[in-house]
Image (cartoon, rainbow, N blue to C red):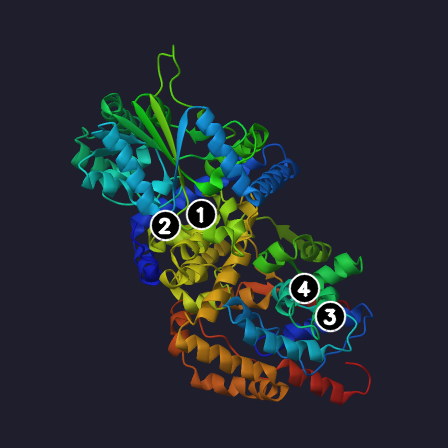
Amino acid sequence: MVDMLYPYTGMSAVEVLRYLDIPVDFPAGQTCCGQPAFNVGYHHEAREVAKQLIKAFENSALIVTPSGSCAAIIRHEYPKLFANDPVLLAEAERLASITWEITEYLVDGLGITDLQSALKEPAKIAFQDACHGLRTLGLKQAGRTLIGNLENVTIIDWDQSEICCGFGGLFSVKMPDVSGAMLQKKLDNIAQCGADFILIGDVSCLTHINSGFKKQGKPPAVRHIVDVLAESIRSQI
Amino acid sequence: MKINSKNFIPAAQVAIHDPDLQKAVSTGTHSGFTKRQAAMFADGHEHGEAMRQQAATIKRYSLSILPELLEQAEENMQANGIKVLWAVDAEEANQHVLEIAREHHVQSVVKSKSMVTEETGLNHTLEAAEIKVLETDLGEYIVQLGEETPSHIVVPVVHKTKASIKKLLIEKAGMPPTDDTEEMAKFARETLRSRFLDADMGISGGNFIIAETGSLCLVSNEGNARLVTSIPRIHVALVGIEKVIRSVEDYATLTQVLPRSATGQIMTVYTHIINGPRLAGETDGPEHVYVILVDNGRSEIYTSDYCEALACIRCGACLNACPVYQITGGHAYGWVYPGPIGAVVTPLLKGLENASPLPYASSLCGICKEVCPVDIDIPRMLLDVRRDLVKMGESDLIWDISIKLWAQGMRSERIFTMLGQTASLGQNLISKKLAGPLSGWTDYRSPPIFAQKSFHQLWKERRGKSNEQP
């Protein structure tokens, strides 16, 4: 989804890593982690797609992704998907052990909590915790720490940050009305939360929520954490 | 109970467009969830989590030795004077009750809340035998008056507004019109009270059976369970075989997480530990106590990869927390157990092919596992049931084709890159509405906008511009 819908979010991730003097490579062979197939029960197809990813990263020492959900499937599901594959299991386990969501990598992996940068304009920011990041990776603080340490930022607390937006991948296609009703609640709550914009660590939820606003003729309210981090760096340089 | 789970999507659609249901379910689940959070973490998050993990360990340990525990429970209950019967399926369970009723010339039955008897459809069996059955839990009483089924494990009428309950009580039970909730409850209490005194048999469920002491445990709030289990001559409890636990100590832990999770109470108003019928010299209590241990598909789950589902203590916390249940309410799920745990156990108990939409009725957000007092990994099981459905060929053809085509594209860097280059061109073909299986998406959302250049392209260009690393 980053590749085709939000390539500039990918570029923001690169920018943040480069700013911290971390060498970045993008193995061109990669496509998708296979999650869409996996989540609807097509494990064979998910495995086929995952093989491509495993191969693409065979020479990488560490993987960083701006999506908690992709990191979660690689870390938690790949070893199970390849449990019966004596050849690829070791490689799947290696991938699981070197894959990080980007804010998690910066804060928990490298101990970087302050990019020493600032937003151009003061902003009130609330977070939406993407479900997979929150509940399978335990992501909560890392993004808030990095953003909270930017100058000009006020973080708004709201009690809806852990409630799902209704996306759930193909759930939103299989059950579009139930998912749509969940989305509507999220849109209403965002409208009332008092923040200038919402930050999230997953482009799938971001796409879902912003597509909902757009359908109603409203501007997008959700941005990716790394886009804002990159923007703060840019205004520094 | 007849299963109608195949109909989940249209039934959910009806629920979405029922403003009364939306209001009632939203208020009820929000209240349940908020109270649960407050009660569970009243002594801090760490304490709540520790309690939850302790309960999880206890239930898993009980399951690991379930066959032994069942035998021990039977032996000790019998030693206490409780008659123990086994029922392989719903029909056998109902037949046991019917035979007991005939043996003791039972004409009228009062019941306290029991989900197992919803499974077996016991009320219909008894009524067909011309035995009067009265539900005495207030919620279940309203369900019975409305000729409905419960829509929640703990709050059977969570789908009903106060106004619709009032209407039902006036029309079906002759309540004098009132808007006062206390007055309504008082009316129901008075109506029910005389029936307790007349009943020949009381039927209850069971929250736990303690194997080492042979005790049947019930938690309740309204006092009706106390009357059901102590006034009539005969008490029959129908209990799922997975409800047996080892010891009183284990009960002490479980009875802390159950009310906290179910109703946000530290303790329920009534706690019953029933050790048998009235003893010589005692002035109250039933003359006979029967416990019917109901399998009805559970032993099949026990020996499958889904054994963990049997750890469920039926608190309803996952229903209250689930953003899908909050929208659809319980009836859309089409059988006894709705919500996330229902989406797992319904296909397992009733056959995957009879409940195929249910495992997909989840965004996999994971909050069900987070609030589960025994930490059942519901999202994991939903994923596994989906896998089994695909293996069985229960997935729709359109999904088979779409996923296979998609996987073909994703396996090849060449096709993927080509897609990336052309997606934004194809965007022009997409109007504001998508077609085929994607059409529902655009009722609530704009189609996604593909970028002019994919990340693959951007990266390649940056590399091309300079020899140094982009």
Name the side, left or right, on which B222 lies relative to B265. Answer: left
**Residue on which disc 4 sits:** A75
**Residue on which disc 1 sits:** B319
Q: Quadrant of the C terminus of chain B?
A: bottom right
Residue at image position (46%, 28%) is B77
Q: Secondary structure at mark 4?
A: helix
Q: Secondary structure at mark 2?
A: loop
Give the quadrant of residue A123.
Answer: bottom right
Discs 2, 3: same chain: no
Comparing labels 1 and 3, the label whose residue is closer to the camera: 3
Q: Amino acid at mark 1?
A: Leu
**Residue on which disc 2 sits:** B330
Residue A90: mark: 3
Name the side, left or right, on which B378 lies relative to B356. Answer: right
Q: Amino acid at mark 3?
A: Ala
Distance of mark 3 from mark 4, alpha carbons? 13 Å
Q: Output the chain of dot 3.
A: A
Contact between marks 1 and 2 (CB within 8 A): the answer is yes
Give the quadrant of residue B316.
Answer: top left
